[in-house]
Structures are given as C-alpha cells and as structure tokens.
Amino acid sequence: MKRKIAAIFAADIAGYSRLVAEDEEETLRRLASYRSVVDDFIAKAGGRIFNTAGDAVLAEFPSAVDAVRCAIDIQESLRTRNMAYPPSRQMSFRIGITIGDVVERDGDLLGDGVNIAARLEGLAEVGGICVSRAVHEQVANKLSVQFADIGAQEVKNIPTPVHAYMVAMRREDGSYSTPQVKKPGAKPAPAPNWMWPLVVAVVSIVAIGVAGFLYFTKLEQTSTAVATSSPPPAATAAAVPSAPATPATTAPSPAAKAPASTPTATPTTNPTATAAASPTPAPSSPAAAAKFPADQVPFVGERARAYLTNEYSAAGDSKAFALNIGGFVGYALNQPNEDAARSAALDQCQKRADTAQSPRRCEIYAVGNNIIYAHGRPPMPPQPWVRVDPMTQRPFASKDVPMVRDQAKARLESFVPAAKSRAVALGPGGQYFMVVGTATIDEAARRALESCGAFAGGACMIVAVDDNFTVPIPSALRVTGFFHAASNPSIIADARDDVVRKLGEAMGWNAVAVGTAGRPGLGLKAADEQTAVNGALAECAKRDSDCHVIAIGPFTVGPIN
C-alpha cells in the first residue's frame, strides 16, 4: 500500500433506481451509452477510473483543475443528450470532487478523500457539481467558472463538517444558474419565549369562533329540516327551495366558484360542492374529461408519446406542447395562463432544436388537450413500411442512395456508425430524413417517414434500416423517381392493375419494361438486377416493339447520363 494526494471524482445517477424500475432494459442501454461518454472524458482529461458499482463512478485526477474541467464537460455533454427525452426519463449525474490523502491498494483507492467525494456528490444538484473548499481554492483563479458557497456541511460518517461549493452550471441560453442548497442538519430557530402566550391566545380565539360557527350552523340546519320536511341531513345541504333560486338569491359555495374563477384549477371537481350549487350534478367539462390524443402526434418517439399520454394529459388546462418536424419537443405544464404555456413550450422546444442545429422551427402543437397544429398529419405510405428481403438486401453505403445530391450524401455517412435502431426515409424528390437511436425499428421507420413526408409534401419510402438497404437499389440504370404502376402513363390503362398485383406478390429483384404500344413485360423474383432486367425485356418483346425498362424495384429508371 502507498499513500498519495489526489483529486477524487465521484459520480452517480440521480433517481437511478426509479429509472430501472420503470424500464430496466432501456435504462441499462442508456447507462452504457452515457458511461462511454463519461469514461471518454475522464481518459482525455488524464484521469483514471479506479472503481465502479452499478451507476457509480470513482476516478482520480492528477490535478483539481483537470477534475473540475472534466466534470463540467461531462455534465454539459449529457445535458445535451438528455434533451431528447422527457423530464421523467432524463438520466442525470451528480458529481462530487475533493482533494485528499488516499491509500492505493491493488489499483483501488481508499480513505477519507474517497468518502468525502462521495458525500459531496450526494450534496450536488441533479446535473450539477459540488466541490470541497480545497478544490475551490485550487481552481477559483484558473478556470472561468462561477461558484456558490454553501458553507460547512455535516455529512454522514465524516466527523467534521465539510465546507463545500456548488459549481454554477451553464443553462441552455448561455447564462449560469445560481445553486440553492439547503444545508443538511439545519434546524429552524425556536420561537422566542414571548411568542407562546400570543400563540395560545390566537388558538383559543380561533377555537371559540369555530365552535360558535358549528353551533349556529347546526341550529340553522335543524330549523330548515323541520320547516321543509326535507330529506335526511346528508342530503339537506344539496336541497333547494321549491321556487327556483336565481343567482342573485342563491350563491354557490366558494368551492363551487373556484374552478370558474381560477384558470389553474384542476379539472376534477368536488361532488359535494357541485351538488350544493345545483340540484343536478354538473357534468365534467369536455377539456377535463378528454384524453390527449398522444397516438396522433407525429415526429416524436414513443417515450415522448408516453409522457404526453400520462403526465401531459393529466395536467391542468394551462399547458402547451410544441414540436418541430425533426422530433424536438417542448412541454409547459401548470402555467399561469395559456399564453404563458405557449411561450414556455415554444421556447423550450426551440432551444433544444437550436442546440442540435436543427434547421426546422418549432410550432405549437397543442394548447391544453386541444390540437391546434395547422399542418395536420404528414402523408404516409401504406404498411408494411419495411420489407426485409434477403435477395435484395445489401450493406448500406451513402454513395449508393439514389436521387440524393452529393452534398447530402456526405451527411448520410454518419448513418452507419450511429446508434441502433435507425432508419432512412427517402422522398419522391430526393428529400431524405434519418432517425437514429430509437427503441425499435418500427419507431425509427415511423418517425423517419413522418418527418420526411412533412417536408417532401408526399409519402416517402424507407430505403435503409440499421446496416442495410431494405429495397433494391438499381445500378444498371439511373433512378429518376418512385414507381407507381397504378398511375404510370407509360403502361396502357387496362394492364396497370395486373402489374400492381404481380409486383405486390413478388419478392427479389423485379423490373418492368414497355414498348411503343405500352404493353408491359415483367421480370419477377430474380436473384439479381440484370436477370430481372433481361426477363422484363424478353417478356415485353413478345407483346410489343422497341421495349425499354422503365422500373427496377420501387424506382422509375432511365439511361445513365
């Protein structure tokens, strides 16, 4: 064993047990992804991870400056990643850092330095960093970082208080937060002795008032029951005189007034209060009873839809939801009014989109539970969206994506190394949209088709999933567009339905050829492109003259220039 002085870094995930309980598989997958980010930053900063357990990470650094700079980089990187998830599913680390004398044994570090770092991590805000005074003294004049002094903190199993500082983390707008931490162990000051007689007197007066109110209320109820021969006392409060009461003579109770006068009142009502205001129970308002149609929301992932189904739908009316066609979202719940909800949701969505450099602007999709999105649902192709055919499937290569300009193909090079599940949708005019890192292929395909369709103005096609093309990509001829046999003018009208039927049943490579009279020839279920082309030309030549190929797979084709 040997002793040394080291900067100790401790981190773990806030609310990790809850995240695992809600969705174990997804949480573990994301933990591995986030840990790779953390490990990479630690290695680049010259640190060494000496212990891990579950979601916790312990590392040592040669200097406090390196440790704090690394912690800031980690938190800012993970904050950006978390923007893709609703607040309830975000995975945020707390980080604590100290300088201490530690003992090294078989590569592990032991001692008070490690324990204090772990306790500081527990004091940190979610997504924040807490450091000891020793660390603050080392980095205060070396890094352009703001700190908040939270004073001496009493922490578990450490005999003396630890003086701690919180690092002010940068917000999405570039400003810095001001941490507010309640000191553990701080107890409210006892009330001065002179206040006790005053408290006793106030309590006594209130008690006398309540007793008097209850007595006269009981007396009034008894008199009303005798004079009107009303139902039992439980129903008397809901009874009304035989003459219809007008608003001028019968005022509803305060509980019944609250929902009408307060915009932020919850949609549920008190049955007793409702009965007191009217002889018949008031029906629930449509806005309160309606379930937000989360399954209709385009562009977003299933996690966002689940949040809309549960948290958003159950919240009060003063709320709003914003999105853009890239799948970025913003939520605002329990706002003072609808205008505030609109502004907050739109601002949150746009900040997330700007951080990811999304070129599309955010728009308000819903206010309350009412959809106000002006563009409706994007055009979608019929299902199935993905057809896996081993005969035509081959590895994805961005250079082979048809109809896409070279500059756009360069951007598609990031598709293969991205996280699974992923999909590329291609539009009829060469537009495309890729979605990566989703839970399932179905989700990736849906989102890619929705986003692609929204800016293409027409139904798109899934051309790649994960590592492979899912449709045959012609190479013998140039792709010029999508092939729709039912409306293709090159094919005579009375033959189109037959072509549609035969192509719909055929897997493998397929080709269509026509002659001067528009009589089609089909090459179906071929093992390769050239065989399909030869078969289509041969069949066409039996019915027509001057035959040429007009389609290969799902694409129209023409001569290569």
Image (cartoon, rainbow, N blue to C red):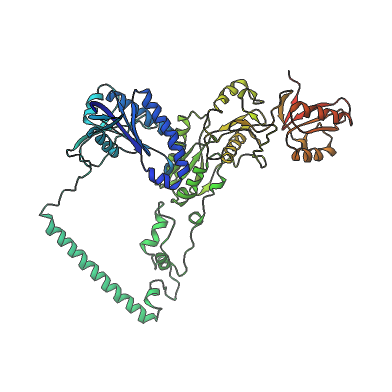
Q: Position of residue 395 (x, y in %)?
A: 62, 28
Q: Position of residue 494 (x, y in %)?
A: 85, 39
Picture quarter with the C terminus: top right
The residue located at (51%, 53%) in the rendering is 291
Quadrant in which residue 213 is drawn:
bottom left
Return the residue nearer the eye: 5 or 383. Answer: 5
Is residue 335 at all visible to an observer of this figure?
Answer: no
Quadrant in which residue 492 is drawn:
top right
Q: Is residue 6 above or below residue 387?
A: above
Picture quarter with the N terminus: top left
Q: Position of residue 519 (x, y in %)?
A: 86, 32
Q: Is residue 291 above or below residue 458?
A: below
Q: In the rendered view, does 150 fall on the left or right side of 404? A: left
Q: In the rendered view, does 387 fall on the left or right side of 181? A: right
Return the residue nearer the eye: 237 or 70. Answer: 70
Q: Position of residue 241 (x, y in %)?
A: 42, 75
Is residue 516 at all visible to an observer of this figure?
Answer: yes
Q: In the rendered view, does 191 fall on the left or right side of 542? A: left
State the residue lying farthest toward the left.
194
Task: Give the tally of numbered discs.
Answer: 0
